[in-house]
Amino acid sequence: MINIIVFNFFITGGFMINKKKIIHIIGAFTICTLTLFTFFSTGKNLISLIKMDEKIIFSGPIFIIFFSFPLFSYSMIFVIYFNITGRCLKYHDNFINCFGMITVISFFLSFPISFYVDYKLKSENYLVCKRISWTSPNTYVKDIKLCD
């Protein structure tokens, strides 16, 4: 009887199912942590824009990343929840639709908002620092000495 249980354990994979769940949970937790770091970094840039600080870092992707945070964080939390409980949330589809719509809208609004912010900051006598690469965000400063 014991031989049949042990043999059946190795045929079905035994602990492999739990290892896969643990790997999914650790991966989702890691991505969620990185997403939180990115969210707070972009949030800091948006707060400096609202406060009109001496140095402002802004571009369209910062806007997109900030408003895509709900979708990414919910997706990672869902992966963790699903691997622990094995079932979906009651309003899972509604959450995905709502957060996905916010992400899509932020993508399309990022272009005109980026142009407006550039125009507004230049009209407020902000100077634009030279960029490191074409993909890096614009840095606006009141005094050219603040450019790194």
Image (cartoon, rainbow, N blue to C red):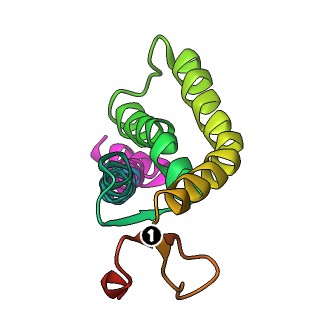
Q: Looking at the picture, how far across and down is residue 65, in whole percent? A: 50, 51
Magenta span: helix, strand or loop, mainly?
helix
Q: What segment is highlighted magenta in the picture?
A: 1-23
The N terminus sits in image quarter: top left
* Left or right side of 127 for 105: right
Q: For the residue marked with disc 1, what is the amino acid?
A: Tyr
Q: Which is nearer the eye, 14 or 57? A: 57
The answer to which image quadrant residue 41 occupies is bottom left
* Left or right side of 101 for 124: left
Give the answer, above or below, for where 75 lies relative to 132: above
* Left or right side of 87 for 123: right
> How many labels were placed on the picture?
1
Q: Which is nearer the eye, 144 or 88? A: 144
Task: Name the secondary structure under disc 1.
Answer: strand
The C terminus sits in image quarter: bottom left
Furthest toward the top, the residue is 90
Q: Looking at the picture, how far across and down is residue 82, in whole percent? A: 42, 32
Q: Which is nearer the eye, 51 or 25? A: 51
**The magenta stretch spans residue 148:** no
Q: Looking at the picture, how far across and down is residue 6, in whole percent? A: 34, 50
Q: Name the residue under label 1.
A: 140
Tell me which residue sits at (52%, 43%) in the image: 68
Tell me which residue sits at (57%, 22%) in the image: 98
Q: Looking at the picture, how far across and down is residue 118, in whole percent? A: 58, 59
Tell me which residue sits at (31%, 82%) in the image: 146
Give the answer, above or below, for where 106 lies relative to 28: above
Q: Which is nearer the eye, 36 or 108? A: 108
Tell me which residue sits at (49%, 40%) in the image: 67
Specify few, some or many for label 1: CA neighbours under 10 Å numbering under 14, 14-19, or 20 or more: many
**The magenta stretch spans residue 13:** yes
